[in-house]
Amino acid sequence: MTLVRWSFPTQIVFGAGAVAETGSSIVAHGGTRALVVTDAGVRSAGLVLPVERSLALAGIAAAVYDGVVGNPLEAHVTAGYEAFLAHGADCVVAIGGGSALDVAKIVALRQHHRRPLADYDDAIGGDRLVTEPVAPIVAIPTTAGTGSEVGRSGVITLAATSRKTVIFAPRLMPRVALLDPELTRSMPPFMTAATGYDALTHSIEAFVARGDHPLCDGVALRGIELAARSLARAVTHGNDLDARGDMLKAAMMGAVAFQKGLGACHSLAHPLSNLCGTHHGLANALCLPAVVRFNLEAGGDTRARYAAIARILCGTADADRCAPALAELRAAIGLPASLSAAGIAEASLPALAEGAVLDSCHASNPRACTLEDLRGLYRASY
Ligand SMILES: NC(=O)c1ccc[n+]([C@@H]2O[C@H](COP(=O)([O-])OP(=O)(O)OC[C@H]3O[C@@H](n4cnc5c(N)ncnc54)[C@H](O)[C@@H]3O)[C@@H](O)[C@H]2O)c1
Ligand SMILES: [Fe+2]
Protein backbone atom coordinates (compact mmCIF):
# COMPACT_ATOMS: atom_id res chain seq x y z
CA MET A 1 0.00 0.00 0.00
CA THR A 2 1.30 3.50 -0.87
CA LEU A 3 1.63 5.91 2.02
CA VAL A 4 -0.32 9.18 1.71
CA ARG A 5 0.09 12.31 3.84
CA TRP A 6 -2.68 14.65 5.05
CA SER A 7 -2.46 17.89 7.03
CA PHE A 8 -4.70 20.99 7.54
CA PRO A 9 -2.85 23.25 9.92
CA THR A 10 -3.75 26.91 9.18
CA GLN A 11 -5.14 28.94 12.05
CA ILE A 12 -8.32 30.68 10.81
CA VAL A 13 -10.30 33.46 12.46
CA PHE A 14 -13.75 33.92 10.90
CA GLY A 15 -16.34 36.63 11.43
CA ALA A 16 -17.23 40.30 10.97
CA GLY A 17 -14.47 42.35 12.57
CA ALA A 18 -11.80 39.62 12.33
CA VAL A 19 -9.48 42.14 10.64
CA ALA A 20 -8.97 43.76 14.07
CA GLU A 21 -6.84 40.73 14.98
CA THR A 22 -4.15 41.62 12.41
CA GLY A 23 -1.82 43.24 14.94
CA SER A 24 -2.15 40.58 17.63
CA SER A 25 -1.66 37.84 15.01
CA ILE A 26 1.58 39.44 13.85
CA VAL A 27 2.79 39.85 17.44
CA ALA A 28 1.91 36.21 18.20
CA HIS A 29 4.18 35.11 15.37
CA GLY A 30 7.12 37.29 16.35
CA GLY A 31 6.74 40.09 13.79
CA THR A 32 7.86 43.60 14.68
CA ARG A 33 7.92 45.47 11.33
CA ALA A 34 5.28 44.56 8.77
CA LEU A 35 5.08 45.07 5.03
CA VAL A 36 1.43 45.22 3.99
CA VAL A 37 1.08 43.88 0.43
CA THR A 38 -2.05 44.83 -1.50
CA ASP A 39 -3.34 46.41 -4.72
CA ALA A 40 -4.51 49.93 -5.43
CA GLY A 41 -8.17 48.86 -5.86
CA VAL A 42 -8.28 47.24 -2.44
CA ARG A 43 -6.56 50.25 -0.89
CA SER A 44 -8.91 52.76 -2.50
CA ALA A 45 -11.89 50.70 -1.26
CA GLY A 46 -10.62 51.63 2.24
CA LEU A 47 -9.87 48.05 3.20
CA VAL A 48 -6.25 48.64 4.24
CA LEU A 49 -7.20 51.22 6.91
CA PRO A 50 -8.44 48.72 9.53
CA VAL A 51 -5.26 46.71 8.96
CA GLU A 52 -3.06 49.75 9.56
CA ARG A 53 -5.13 50.67 12.61
CA SER A 54 -4.79 47.19 14.11
CA LEU A 55 -1.04 47.07 13.46
CA ALA A 56 -0.55 50.53 15.01
CA LEU A 57 -2.51 49.51 18.12
CA ALA A 58 -0.23 46.48 18.49
CA GLY A 59 2.89 48.64 18.15
CA ILE A 60 3.90 47.21 14.76
CA ALA A 61 5.56 49.64 12.34
CA ALA A 62 3.92 49.16 8.95
CA ALA A 63 4.70 50.14 5.36
CA VAL A 64 2.34 49.49 2.46
CA TYR A 65 3.22 48.15 -1.00
CA ASP A 66 0.11 48.54 -3.17
CA GLY A 67 1.60 47.94 -6.61
CA VAL A 68 0.09 44.48 -7.27
CA VAL A 69 -2.22 44.10 -10.28
CA GLY A 70 -4.50 41.24 -11.40
CA ASN A 71 -2.71 38.18 -12.80
CA PRO A 72 0.51 39.41 -11.13
CA LEU A 73 3.95 39.36 -12.66
CA GLU A 74 7.39 38.61 -11.33
CA ALA A 75 8.04 42.39 -11.43
CA HIS A 76 5.45 42.85 -8.65
CA VAL A 77 7.34 40.40 -6.46
CA THR A 78 10.59 42.26 -7.16
CA ALA A 79 9.05 45.64 -6.30
CA GLY A 80 7.35 44.19 -3.22
CA TYR A 81 10.59 42.68 -1.98
CA GLU A 82 12.37 46.02 -2.47
CA ALA A 83 9.68 47.61 -0.27
CA PHE A 84 10.18 44.81 2.29
CA LEU A 85 13.93 45.55 2.43
CA ALA A 86 13.47 49.33 2.45
CA HIS A 87 11.16 49.06 5.47
CA GLY A 88 13.42 46.57 7.28
CA ALA A 89 10.37 44.31 7.51
CA ASP A 90 10.39 40.91 9.21
CA CYS A 91 6.81 39.85 8.42
CA VAL A 92 4.12 40.32 5.77
CA VAL A 93 0.43 41.18 5.95
CA ALA A 94 -1.30 40.11 2.74
CA ILE A 95 -4.63 41.84 2.10
CA GLY A 96 -6.62 41.61 -1.11
CA GLY A 97 -7.67 39.06 -3.67
CA GLY A 98 -5.57 36.14 -4.82
CA SER A 99 -3.27 38.46 -6.77
CA ALA A 100 -2.17 40.42 -3.70
CA LEU A 101 -2.03 37.34 -1.48
CA ASP A 102 0.12 35.42 -3.97
CA VAL A 103 2.59 38.27 -4.42
CA ALA A 104 2.77 38.71 -0.65
CA LYS A 105 3.62 35.04 -0.16
CA ILE A 106 6.43 35.12 -2.71
CA VAL A 107 7.78 38.38 -1.23
CA ALA A 108 7.95 36.58 2.13
CA LEU A 109 9.71 33.65 0.41
CA ARG A 110 12.28 36.06 -1.06
CA GLN A 111 13.59 36.96 2.41
CA HIS A 112 15.77 33.84 2.46
CA HIS A 113 15.38 32.32 -1.03
CA ARG A 114 17.28 34.28 -3.66
CA ARG A 115 17.48 31.91 -6.65
CA PRO A 116 15.66 32.85 -9.88
CA LEU A 117 11.93 32.34 -9.24
CA ALA A 118 11.74 29.80 -12.09
CA ASP A 119 13.84 27.42 -9.96
CA TYR A 120 10.96 27.20 -7.44
CA ASP A 121 8.39 26.23 -10.12
CA ASP A 122 6.21 23.43 -8.75
CA ALA A 123 6.15 21.79 -12.18
CA ILE A 124 9.87 20.94 -11.79
CA GLY A 125 9.71 20.05 -8.10
CA GLY A 126 10.96 23.49 -7.02
CA ASP A 127 9.63 23.02 -3.48
CA ARG A 128 12.72 20.97 -2.63
CA LEU A 129 14.68 24.26 -2.77
CA VAL A 130 12.46 25.93 -0.17
CA THR A 131 14.60 24.90 2.76
CA GLU A 132 14.91 28.14 4.75
CA PRO A 133 12.29 29.90 6.89
CA VAL A 134 9.73 32.14 5.16
CA ALA A 135 8.79 35.46 6.85
CA PRO A 136 5.55 35.04 8.83
CA ILE A 137 2.44 35.91 6.79
CA VAL A 138 -0.99 36.99 8.02
CA ALA A 139 -3.45 36.74 5.11
CA ILE A 140 -6.72 38.66 4.82
CA PRO A 141 -8.80 37.87 1.72
CA THR A 142 -11.04 40.59 0.28
CA THR A 143 -12.38 38.39 -2.51
CA ALA A 144 -13.96 34.99 -1.90
CA GLY A 145 -12.39 32.81 -4.53
CA THR A 146 -8.81 31.68 -4.58
CA GLY A 147 -8.47 30.59 -0.96
CA SER A 148 -4.83 31.58 -1.25
CA GLU A 149 -5.04 32.58 2.43
CA VAL A 150 -4.88 28.91 3.43
CA GLY A 151 -2.90 27.67 0.44
CA ARG A 152 0.72 26.70 0.12
CA SER A 153 1.23 28.26 -3.27
CA GLY A 154 1.63 31.55 -5.03
CA VAL A 155 0.75 31.90 -8.71
CA ILE A 156 2.97 34.37 -10.59
CA THR A 157 3.62 34.94 -14.29
CA LEU A 158 7.39 34.64 -14.71
CA ALA A 159 9.25 37.10 -16.91
CA ALA A 160 11.34 34.42 -18.66
CA THR A 161 8.42 32.26 -19.83
CA SER A 162 5.36 34.57 -19.64
CA ARG A 163 3.60 31.56 -18.11
CA LYS A 164 1.49 31.47 -14.97
CA THR A 165 3.71 29.49 -12.66
CA VAL A 166 2.72 27.82 -9.42
CA ILE A 167 5.30 28.14 -6.68
CA PHE A 168 4.35 25.61 -4.04
CA ALA A 169 5.90 24.90 -0.67
CA PRO A 170 4.38 24.15 2.72
CA ARG A 171 6.38 27.03 4.23
CA LEU A 172 4.44 29.50 2.07
CA MET A 173 1.30 28.85 4.08
CA PRO A 174 0.18 31.93 6.03
CA ARG A 175 0.42 31.54 9.81
CA VAL A 176 -3.03 33.07 10.31
CA ALA A 177 -5.94 33.68 7.92
CA LEU A 178 -8.44 36.37 8.96
CA LEU A 179 -11.78 35.80 7.17
CA ASP A 180 -13.83 38.95 7.62
CA PRO A 181 -17.02 39.10 5.52
CA GLU A 182 -17.21 42.90 6.02
CA LEU A 183 -14.17 43.21 3.75
CA THR A 184 -15.82 41.43 0.82
CA ARG A 185 -18.97 43.61 0.81
CA SER A 186 -17.44 46.20 -1.52
CA MET A 187 -16.68 43.60 -4.20
CA PRO A 188 -18.72 44.47 -7.32
CA PRO A 189 -21.17 41.84 -8.70
CA PHE A 190 -18.93 40.70 -11.57
CA MET A 191 -15.95 40.15 -9.29
CA THR A 192 -18.14 38.38 -6.70
CA ALA A 193 -19.45 36.08 -9.43
CA ALA A 194 -16.10 35.34 -11.05
CA THR A 195 -14.16 34.78 -7.82
CA GLY A 196 -17.01 32.72 -6.35
CA TYR A 197 -17.02 30.50 -9.42
CA ASP A 198 -13.28 29.96 -8.90
CA ALA A 199 -14.02 28.74 -5.36
CA LEU A 200 -16.70 26.39 -6.66
CA THR A 201 -14.35 25.10 -9.37
CA HIS A 202 -11.65 24.35 -6.79
CA SER A 203 -13.98 22.15 -4.76
CA ILE A 204 -15.40 20.39 -7.84
CA GLU A 205 -12.01 19.73 -9.43
CA ALA A 206 -10.56 18.58 -6.11
CA PHE A 207 -13.47 16.24 -5.39
CA VAL A 208 -13.06 14.40 -8.71
CA ALA A 209 -9.23 14.66 -8.82
CA ARG A 210 -7.12 11.53 -8.89
CA GLY A 211 -5.75 10.41 -5.56
CA ASP A 212 -6.98 9.20 -2.21
CA HIS A 213 -7.83 12.05 0.14
CA PRO A 214 -11.01 11.52 2.16
CA LEU A 215 -10.45 14.67 4.22
CA CYS A 216 -10.25 16.83 1.10
CA ASP A 217 -13.28 15.04 -0.36
CA GLY A 218 -15.38 15.93 2.69
CA VAL A 219 -14.19 19.53 2.72
CA ALA A 220 -14.84 19.82 -1.04
CA LEU A 221 -18.44 18.61 -0.77
CA ARG A 222 -19.22 21.09 2.00
CA GLY A 223 -17.50 23.83 -0.02
CA ILE A 224 -19.73 23.03 -3.00
CA GLU A 225 -22.81 23.16 -0.74
CA LEU A 226 -21.89 26.58 0.63
CA ALA A 227 -21.20 28.00 -2.84
CA ALA A 228 -24.40 26.48 -4.27
CA ARG A 229 -26.37 28.00 -1.39
CA SER A 230 -24.87 31.49 -1.37
CA LEU A 231 -23.03 32.45 -4.57
CA ALA A 232 -26.05 33.90 -6.38
CA ARG A 233 -27.21 35.69 -3.23
CA ALA A 234 -23.76 37.22 -2.66
CA VAL A 235 -23.85 38.53 -6.24
CA THR A 236 -27.34 40.02 -6.07
CA HIS A 237 -27.31 41.09 -2.39
CA GLY A 238 -23.76 42.21 -1.80
CA ASN A 239 -24.48 43.46 1.71
CA ASP A 240 -25.79 40.10 2.92
CA LEU A 241 -23.08 39.20 5.43
CA ASP A 242 -24.31 35.61 5.77
CA ALA A 243 -23.96 35.02 2.03
CA ARG A 244 -20.60 36.81 2.03
CA GLY A 245 -19.51 34.68 4.97
CA ASP A 246 -20.59 31.47 3.26
CA MET A 247 -18.56 32.42 0.20
CA LEU A 248 -15.46 33.18 2.28
CA LYS A 249 -15.82 29.74 3.86
CA ALA A 250 -16.41 28.13 0.46
CA ALA A 251 -13.28 29.80 -0.92
CA MET A 252 -11.15 28.76 2.04
CA MET A 253 -12.49 25.19 1.87
CA GLY A 254 -11.92 24.99 -1.88
CA ALA A 255 -8.26 25.78 -1.36
CA VAL A 256 -7.95 23.28 1.48
CA ALA A 257 -9.58 20.69 -0.79
CA PHE A 258 -7.29 21.29 -3.74
CA GLN A 259 -4.30 20.10 -1.76
CA LYS A 260 -5.55 16.88 -3.30
CA GLY A 261 -5.12 18.32 -6.79
CA LEU A 262 -6.96 20.33 -9.43
CA GLY A 263 -7.83 19.37 -12.98
CA ALA A 264 -8.12 20.24 -16.65
CA CYS A 265 -10.31 23.29 -16.05
CA HIS A 266 -7.48 25.09 -14.28
CA SER A 267 -5.05 24.10 -17.04
CA LEU A 268 -7.44 25.70 -19.55
CA ALA A 269 -7.95 28.76 -17.35
CA HIS A 270 -4.31 29.66 -16.81
CA PRO A 271 -3.42 30.41 -20.48
CA LEU A 272 -6.67 32.39 -20.85
CA SER A 273 -5.35 34.74 -18.15
CA ASN A 274 -1.78 34.78 -19.50
CA LEU A 275 -2.57 35.28 -23.16
CA CYS A 276 -5.95 37.02 -23.13
CA GLY A 277 -6.02 38.72 -19.70
CA THR A 278 -9.24 36.91 -18.73
CA HIS A 279 -10.02 37.02 -14.99
CA HIS A 280 -9.04 33.67 -13.48
CA GLY A 281 -12.46 32.85 -12.02
CA LEU A 282 -14.25 33.82 -15.21
CA ALA A 283 -11.83 31.65 -17.20
CA ASN A 284 -12.81 28.68 -15.03
CA ALA A 285 -16.51 29.45 -15.40
CA LEU A 286 -16.20 29.51 -19.18
CA CYS A 287 -14.53 26.08 -19.33
CA LEU A 288 -15.94 24.04 -16.43
CA PRO A 289 -19.12 22.61 -18.03
CA ALA A 290 -17.15 21.27 -21.02
CA VAL A 291 -14.55 19.73 -18.71
CA VAL A 292 -17.29 18.01 -16.70
CA ARG A 293 -18.79 16.51 -19.88
CA PHE A 294 -15.33 15.37 -20.99
CA ASN A 295 -14.55 13.80 -17.60
CA LEU A 296 -17.85 11.91 -17.44
CA GLU A 297 -16.44 9.66 -20.16
CA ALA A 298 -14.02 8.33 -17.54
CA GLY A 299 -17.04 6.51 -16.08
CA GLY A 300 -16.91 4.49 -12.84
CA ASP A 301 -16.02 6.36 -9.68
CA THR A 302 -15.76 9.66 -11.58
CA ARG A 303 -19.41 9.42 -12.68
CA ALA A 304 -20.45 8.60 -9.12
CA ARG A 305 -18.59 11.67 -7.88
CA TYR A 306 -20.30 13.94 -10.42
CA ALA A 307 -23.63 12.41 -9.38
CA ALA A 308 -22.90 13.45 -5.78
CA ILE A 309 -22.12 16.98 -7.00
CA ALA A 310 -25.32 17.04 -9.09
CA ARG A 311 -27.30 16.10 -5.98
CA ILE A 312 -25.98 19.23 -4.27
CA LEU A 313 -26.39 21.51 -7.30
CA CYS A 314 -29.84 20.43 -8.46
CA GLY A 315 -31.21 17.87 -6.01
CA THR A 316 -30.89 14.93 -8.42
CA ALA A 317 -28.03 12.44 -8.20
CA ASP A 318 -27.71 12.32 -11.97
CA ALA A 319 -24.16 12.89 -13.21
CA ASP A 320 -25.45 14.14 -16.57
CA ARG A 321 -27.24 17.03 -14.81
CA CYS A 322 -23.97 18.40 -13.49
CA ALA A 323 -22.72 20.31 -16.56
CA PRO A 324 -26.13 21.91 -17.36
CA ALA A 325 -26.54 22.92 -13.70
CA LEU A 326 -23.10 24.57 -13.75
CA ALA A 327 -23.97 26.44 -16.96
CA GLU A 328 -27.28 27.57 -15.40
CA LEU A 329 -25.51 28.86 -12.31
CA ARG A 330 -23.01 30.71 -14.50
CA ALA A 331 -25.90 32.42 -16.31
CA ALA A 332 -27.75 33.16 -13.07
CA ILE A 333 -24.78 35.11 -11.71
CA GLY A 334 -24.40 37.12 -14.90
CA LEU A 335 -21.26 35.59 -16.38
CA PRO A 336 -20.90 35.08 -20.15
CA ALA A 337 -21.81 31.64 -21.50
CA SER A 338 -18.87 30.98 -23.82
CA LEU A 339 -15.34 32.00 -24.76
CA SER A 340 -16.72 33.82 -27.79
CA ALA A 341 -19.25 35.74 -25.65
CA ALA A 342 -16.32 36.69 -23.39
CA GLY A 343 -14.51 38.20 -26.38
CA ILE A 344 -11.81 35.54 -26.88
CA ALA A 345 -10.63 35.45 -30.52
CA GLU A 346 -11.04 32.06 -32.18
CA ALA A 347 -7.55 32.44 -33.66
CA SER A 348 -6.06 32.24 -30.14
CA LEU A 349 -7.35 28.71 -29.43
CA PRO A 350 -4.29 26.80 -30.78
CA ALA A 351 -1.85 28.92 -28.73
CA LEU A 352 -4.09 28.54 -25.67
CA ALA A 353 -4.02 24.75 -26.03
CA GLU A 354 -0.21 24.79 -26.31
CA GLY A 355 -0.16 26.64 -22.98
CA ALA A 356 -2.73 24.38 -21.33
CA VAL A 357 -0.84 21.19 -22.07
CA LEU A 358 2.25 22.58 -20.32
CA ASP A 359 0.23 23.45 -17.21
CA SER A 360 0.63 21.01 -14.34
CA CYS A 361 -2.99 21.04 -13.05
CA HIS A 362 -4.34 18.49 -15.53
CA ALA A 363 -1.96 15.84 -14.17
CA SER A 364 -4.57 15.12 -11.47
CA ASN A 365 -7.58 15.37 -13.80
CA PRO A 366 -9.62 12.14 -13.56
CA ARG A 367 -9.29 11.63 -17.32
CA ALA A 368 -5.88 12.05 -19.00
CA CYS A 369 -5.72 15.01 -21.42
CA THR A 370 -3.69 15.25 -24.62
CA LEU A 371 -3.00 18.46 -26.50
CA GLU A 372 -5.82 17.49 -28.88
CA ASP A 373 -8.22 16.95 -25.94
CA LEU A 374 -7.43 20.38 -24.52
CA ARG A 375 -7.92 21.99 -27.93
CA GLY A 376 -11.28 20.19 -28.14
CA LEU A 377 -12.25 21.49 -24.69
CA TYR A 378 -11.57 25.08 -25.76
CA ARG A 379 -13.62 24.47 -28.90
CA ALA A 380 -16.46 22.98 -26.85
CA SER A 381 -16.36 26.08 -24.62
CA TYR A 382 -16.25 28.53 -27.55
N1 LIG B 1 -2.62 30.75 -4.69
C1 LIG B 1 -3.60 30.02 -5.11
O1 LIG B 1 -3.79 28.94 -4.63
C2 LIG B 1 -4.50 30.51 -6.19
C3 LIG B 1 -5.67 29.81 -6.51
C4 LIG B 1 -6.49 30.32 -7.53
C5 LIG B 1 -6.15 31.50 -8.17
N2 LIG B 1 -5.00 32.16 -7.86
C6 LIG B 1 -4.60 33.41 -8.53
O2 LIG B 1 -5.30 34.51 -7.90
C7 LIG B 1 -5.47 35.56 -8.85
C8 LIG B 1 -6.93 35.99 -8.90
O3 LIG B 1 -7.32 36.47 -7.65
P1 LIG B 1 -8.80 37.04 -7.39
O4 LIG B 1 -9.75 36.27 -8.23
O5 LIG B 1 -9.03 37.07 -5.95
O6 LIG B 1 -8.76 38.53 -8.01
P2 LIG B 1 -7.69 39.69 -7.86
O7 LIG B 1 -6.87 39.57 -6.64
O8 LIG B 1 -6.95 39.81 -9.15
O9 LIG B 1 -8.63 40.96 -7.66
C9 LIG B 1 -9.48 41.37 -8.70
C10 LIG B 1 -9.91 42.81 -8.54
O10 LIG B 1 -10.82 42.96 -7.46
C11 LIG B 1 -10.49 44.09 -6.68
N3 LIG B 1 -10.95 43.79 -5.33
C12 LIG B 1 -10.53 42.79 -4.51
N4 LIG B 1 -11.24 42.79 -3.37
C13 LIG B 1 -12.12 43.81 -3.45
C14 LIG B 1 -13.13 44.31 -2.60
N5 LIG B 1 -13.42 43.71 -1.43
N6 LIG B 1 -13.83 45.39 -2.99
C15 LIG B 1 -13.59 45.98 -4.20
N7 LIG B 1 -12.66 45.54 -5.06
C16 LIG B 1 -11.94 44.46 -4.69
C17 LIG B 1 -8.99 44.22 -6.82
O11 LIG B 1 -8.57 45.54 -6.58
C18 LIG B 1 -8.77 43.80 -8.25
O12 LIG B 1 -8.92 44.90 -9.11
C19 LIG B 1 -4.98 35.02 -10.18
O13 LIG B 1 -3.67 35.51 -10.43
C20 LIG B 1 -4.97 33.52 -9.98
O14 LIG B 1 -4.06 32.85 -10.80
C21 LIG B 1 -4.20 31.69 -6.87
FE1 LIG C 1 -8.46 28.83 -9.20
Image (cartoon, grey):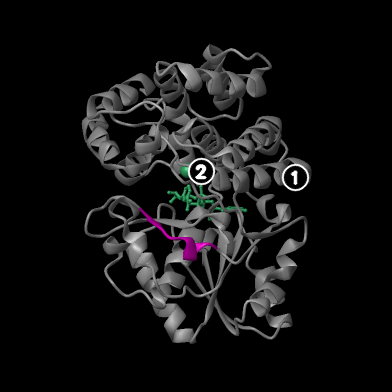
Q: Tell me where residue 114 appears, x and y as whole percent.
A: 32, 75
Q: Earlier in the sequence, mark 2 or mark 1?
A: 1
Up the image or down, 295 lies above or below 240; here it is above
Q: Left or right: 264 with respect to 184? A: left
In the image shown, does 118 or 208 lie closer to the viewer? 208
Label 2 with label 1: CB-CB less than 8 Å: no
For label 2, the SS is loop
At 48% from the left edge and 61% from the top edge, which residue is drawn? 170
Vertical comparison of 76 with 367: above or below: below
Residue drawn at 69 percent across, 86 percent down: 59
The picture quadrant where one finds residue 310 is top right
Residue 239 image label: 1
Q: Is residue 192 visible?
A: no
Q: Tell me where the magenta segment starts and ends, as one range.
A: 166-173
Dot 1 falls on a residue whose secondary structure is loop
Please tell me how crowded label 2 is: few (under 14), some (14-19), or many (20+) other residues with Cα within 10 Å. Answer: many
Is 56 situated above or below 303? below
Which mark identifies residue 258? 2
What is the quadrant of the N terminus in the image?
Answer: top left
* Mark 2 vs ligand 1: CB below 8 Å: yes
The x and y percentages for residue 311 are: 65, 19
Q: Which amino acid type is marked by label 2?
A: Phe
Residue at point 32% right, 60% down? 126
